[in-house]
Image (cartoon, rainbow, N blue to C red):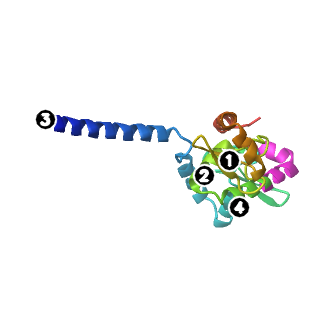
Amino acid sequence: MKSIRFQNTTAVGLFLFSGIAAQLAYADSDQLPKDVDATVNAAFAKLTPSDRVVAEAQRWCPVTPDRLGAMGATVRIMLEGKTVFLCCADCEKDARANPKATLGKVDKLKKINTAFAKLSMADRQIAEAQHYCAVQNKNDLGSMGTPIKVMLEGQPVFLCCGGCKKSAEANPMATLATVAKLKAANAKGHEHGDHK
């Protein structure tokens, strides 16, 4: 009877440990929603309904790689009669320095946001963390429509279009290494911002 109790206790202990280990691994993954969503939601809640629609359509700052609202209150400016949102006041000078380029970037961000909206929330978080195509890594994901998801070695990878699938699958390890670099560079950009 003691050996059965010991085995059951050991089994329960291993089960609990594996569950904790899985949660810790999940906490380090790109799939776990970050606290930034709560900060963004709080910042967007302070906007007027019409401004919120514009900010949600834009989603990202046109100057830095930061989510609107991730740094707290967004900054609203007008460029050539159009409303533009920035992540912070530090971006205003750069945004105003070349209004046409800023507005072009905003249009591109809106297009990308529309394409990303067709992904599940989990896939969207992974694709946003990757930011660029794993094959044509100068192409923003979403700039050519909804990103294409492929599984390589059990890991999700996003591509700008179906034309990149064959190249991505030809050398999975190299593709995954590129994705790791893209995610690291994107995380560094978000961490430090690209303020000049």
- Residue at x 82% of width, y 49% of height: 102
Coordinates of residue 25 in the picture (x, y in percent): 47, 38
Report the disc number at residue 158: 1
Residue at image mark 4 = 54
Which amino acid, by three-letter code, is at mark 2?
Asp
113 or 145, which is in the foreground? 145
Q: Is residue 92 visible?
A: yes
Give above or below for 11 relative to 43. Answer: above
Structural distance between the alpha carbons of marks 2 and 4: 23 Å
Give above or below for 65 relative to 109. Answer: above
First reached walking from the N terminus: tag 4 or tag 1: 4
- Disc 1 is placed on an element classified as strand
Which amino acid, by three-letter code, is at mark 4?
Val
Which amino acid, by three-letter code, is at mark 1?
Phe
- Asked if the residues shown at circle 2 and circle 3 are in contact, with their CB atoms under 8 angstroms apart, the answer is no
Residue at image mark 3 = 2
Q: Quadrant of the N terminus?
A: top left
First reached walking from the N terminus: tag 1 or tag 3: 3
Label 4 neighbour load within 10 Å: few <14, some 14-19, many 20+: some
- Which region of the structure is painted magenta? 91-107
Label 3 neighbour load within 10 Å: few <14, some 14-19, many 20+: few
Coordinates of residue 90 in the picture (x, y in percent): 72, 41
Decide whether the magenta segment is chiefly helix, strand or loop: helix
First reached walking from the N terminus: tag 1 or tag 2: 2
Label 2 neighbour load within 10 Å: few <14, some 14-19, many 20+: some
- Asked if the residues shown at circle 1 and circle 2 are in contact, with their CB atoms under 8 angstroms apart, the answer is yes
Q: Is residue 100 magenta?
A: yes
Report the disc number at residue 114: none
